[in-house]
Amino acid sequence: MTRPVTEWVNVTDDISIIARESGEVWFHNRSSTKGGLDPFAAPMEGPGSLGSTIGLLDGAINLAFSTIEARLARPEPTLIAYIVALVGAYHTSVDTPRNLRRAKSRFEELGRPEVAAYLEDRAREETGHDRLALKDLRALGVPGDRLVASFIPEGIKPLCKRFDDLCAEDYPIGSIGYSYCLERIAALKEDSDIDNVRALCPEGVDATRFLRSHSSLGSEAAHVDETIEFVASLPANDRIKVVQETYRSALIMAEGYNNELLKSEAQMREEMERALGEPLPYLHMTGLSGVQKHDVASARAD
Ligand SMILES: [Fe+2]
Ligand SMILES: [Fe+2]
């Protein structure tokens, strides 16, 4: 009988994530074990399994988010915050295919055709997602092209930079960890999250194209499953790097969320209007009258 797989990855100076094939996951504090007695001090070397890979990847995200969870303000969703989120979605999507193909070329050079093929599939699947966010902005009467050209939410900048940097590395395997982090978090969104956004939007306006495709209803759930399967098939060294980067990307993302969520509506609006150089349509109103709804509907460009 083969022994069930146990995998582990050190994600900080003293915390390891340990996961079993059965799905069990725990965080191990290495500083609490005596030197030489810690079986998880050395990097893992064995094969991966689906159950333990899920445990490591999701464990990395949970651990990163737990560091800021307590500080997170959880305000009611607002239309302004949603517009900021759409601008962020645009920026995290617009360079994705180009970046993934850059990493793909590197793996071709390195003689790793299976990684290159995986990255090419991802690049193809992610193509056009920036346009979904632009369409949603336009549907809301927001001049999306001009807004994204002049404004990038503060909390999103480090995330975009991280992905650019990872894809340009000599051994860009971390790009898979970053992508997993974003897709996994998107795939947590459910029907009710989409309904909540619909309730914020003016009547008759569909501004949920990006959200639907980046939720449990869209392709994200399948992307997540494919990535888990692919990561589980990688050699131990690669799996370690992917999990470590999932943790770092999740930390950056959690920090960014925190920054954006702590801003008031007035601050978010002011930042966007300053960048745009003009007031955003109808956003100074708290409720939308019939006339304003008409204005929004006629401003839809797609
Ligand atoms: Fe996407
Ligand atoms: Fe995706």
Image (tube, rainbow, N blue to C red):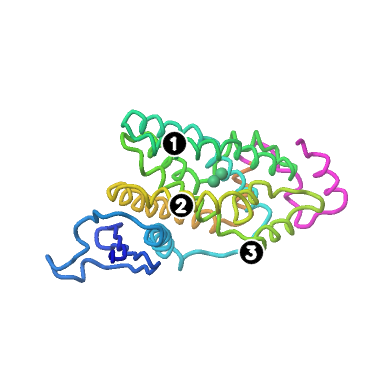
Q: Quadrant of ligand 1?
A: top right
Q: Residue 194 in the image: x percent, y percent?
A: 67, 57
255 lies left or right of 21: right
Quarter location, residue 13: bottom left
205 lies left or right of 13: right
Q: Residue 217 in the image: x percent, y percent?
A: 63, 55
Cα separation between marks 3 and 1: 42 Å
Mark 3 and mark 1 lie on one chain; the one further toward the N terminus is: 3
Residue ID at (78%, 39%): 300
Would you place residue 225 above or below residue 139 in this image? Answer: below
Would you place residue 86 above or below residue 185 in this image? Answer: above
Is ligand 2 closer than 8 angstroms to the Cβ of mark 1? no
Mark 3 or mark 1: which is in front?
A: 1
176 lies left or right of 152: left
Which residues, given as a range, are shown in magenta? 274-302
Can you identify the residue that label 3 sits on? 76
Can you identify the residue that label 2 sits on? 181
Amino acid on which disc 3 is placed: Glu
Residue ID at (49%, 57%): 258
Q: Residue 288 in the image: x percent, y percent?
A: 81, 54
Q: Residues within 10 Å of mark 2 (few under 14, many from 20)?
A: many
Residue in front for this viewpoint, 176 or 75? 176
Q: Residues within 10 Å of mark 3 (few under 14, many from 20)?
A: few
